[in-house]
Amino acid sequence: MAALYSRSRLKLLLRSALHLSNRTLTGSGGKFDYDLLVIGGGSGGLACSKEAAQLGQKVAVLDYVEPSVRGTKWGLGGTCVNVGCIPKKLMHQAALLGSAVKDAQKYGWQIPQPVSHDWATLAESVQNYVKSLNWGHRVQLQDRKVKYMNMKGSLVDDHTVRCLSSRGKEMTVTARNILIATGGRPKYPTHVPGALEFGISSDDLFWLKETPGKTLVVGASYVGLECAGFLTGIGLEATVMVRSIALRGFDQQMSRLVTDYMQGYGTRFCWDCVPKKVEKLPSGLLQVTWTDSRTGQDHQDTFNSVLWAVGRAPETGTLNLQQVGVELDGDTRKVMVADDERTSVPNIYAIGDIAQGRPELTPTAIHAGKLLARRLAGLSSQLMDYSNVPTTVFTPLEYGCVGLSEEEAERRYGKDKIEVYHAFYKPLEFTVAERDSSQCYIKVVCERDGDQKVVGLHFTGLNAGEVTQGFALSLRCGLSYAQLRDSVGIHPTCAEELTKIYITKRSGLDATVTGC
């Protein structure tokens, strides 16, 4: 009966949306070409456009990828599909399989040695899959009758967009509402001689035909650590240069566990160091000079590739936003938005990485885009809730988290007002393989008073994303420590350790799990 009601309600909403759309366009005498024009064909823009079209809106999407500094290009789908989450996770999987091959021998598999990895095979397989996703997005837009234009867009006024193709063809289109969803691109440290001429970024790495070889990764964001991790995992030399701390914005105890594991895994770290210059030698190798901030001394080494992972910049420069009244943040140059994703111009919206103060995460952009489409169609008033958004860093030892870091919880509540439960555990999979588990750790941050509401949950270990996703739902439903302890675990799993956690940091007791 409930399912029948849901289907009937959906049909009613769709009929209402179609009626609203027709009334909007025809009632204004066809004033606008489209109900919604989306600039940017990434995760958020595509989600919003498809949802709006399904709800009866007339929709167009403009998407154009400027080649990277090295000339790398890709298709429809944005950063996640082409040069982010998808190829990253596939290459991370390649590295995990390398570790599994080593473990397999302890489990009785007879594997001829030496085992080697072929970059060209991996790259081609990953790139072919990404291209299939590009095509799939185009088909989905066509099926939903969304007009796709492979053109650059810039605002003429609050309802008009100038469109320019790569061949110089120009046209203008109008829309009742405009969505900016152009995302961001990697930054280059232009003050470092040779950085632009000889470096690459994550925009290039996944599309290389030949192995990057011995690689210096400058920057210890999640992008930098993930790339260094899978490069190490497939047998390449990888060094991470860290100016100050790794995983800024994440729980710093967890960050240290991640980098400690990576160092044991074979990734080299240069802490408190900054690059000074990059030079290309006659041999083709890149000679990098850097300064140790602690000693002031300069050091040099040679690499096949230098990967810059020093942050991302929003793609706002060519959109003509400020000229039509869209306010940008003075420091980040991101678009200032209200709770409903509206900019300072009432009919212009922004979602995803381009929006100031929003998490730079694909799922949040997708969800925000869908909710915006429903509001624009007049079918909902629901706003995106950006609290308790889970995420995972796909380093060799994965790190998943949701809610507040321990540092942020202390700032918000005070150190004496929070209780931190924690445990060091050993995954069963590590036992026979004799793998080091000293960085496999769980931390649950709770309010100290009352029901001890859980405000943060952190996990390093196998399949961290899969573990964190389920607990993220619990946090959104108001999970308390008592409820967590009353949950029955699935045995034997790493996730069940969260249901058994009982030692507090405050107690000073040994938090190492013993027994099974």
Image (spheres, rainbow, N blue to C red):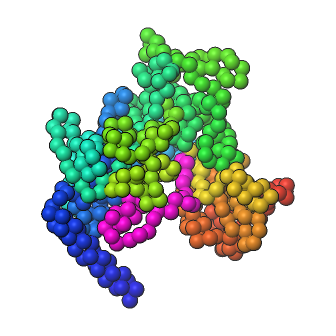
Q: Residue at x 40, y 86 (%)?
A: 2
Rendered-image quadrant of the C terminus: bottom right
Question: How many numbered marks, from 0 up?
Answer: 0
Q: From the top left corner, tell me how far across and down residue 89 is, in percent.
A: 46, 48
* Residue 437 horizontal side relative to residue 81, left or right: right
User: Furthest-right residue in view?
Assistant: 508
**Residue 234, visible in the rendered structure:** no
Does 481 sit above or below residue 120? below
User: Furthest-bottom residue in view?
Assistant: 1
Does 238 sit above or below residue 279? below
User: Furthest-top residue in view?
Assistant: 282
- Res 416 → quadrant: bottom right
Q: Residue at x 38, y 71 (%)?
A: 380
Q: From the top left corner, tell me how far across and down residue 214 is, in percent.
A: 51, 26
Does 327 sit above or below residue 466? above
Q: From the top left corner, tell me how far across and down residue 363 is, in percent.
A: 45, 57
Q: Is residue 496 magenta?
A: no
Q: Does the magenta stretch include residue 372?
A: yes
Instruction: Give, as a single range, the part of the protein colored magenta.
Output: 365-394
**Residue 405, visible in the rendered structure:** yes
Question: Is 55 or 289 nearer to us in this picture?
Answer: 55
Question: Is 388 or 469 nearer to us in this picture?
Answer: 388
Q: Residue at x 29, y 50 (%)?
A: 158
Rendered-image quadrant of the N terminus: bottom left
Q: From the top left corner, tell me how far across and down residue 439 is, in percent.
A: 69, 47
* Residue 76 horizontal side relative to residue 458, left or right: left
Q: Which residue is drawn at 85% across and 55% down?
A: 508
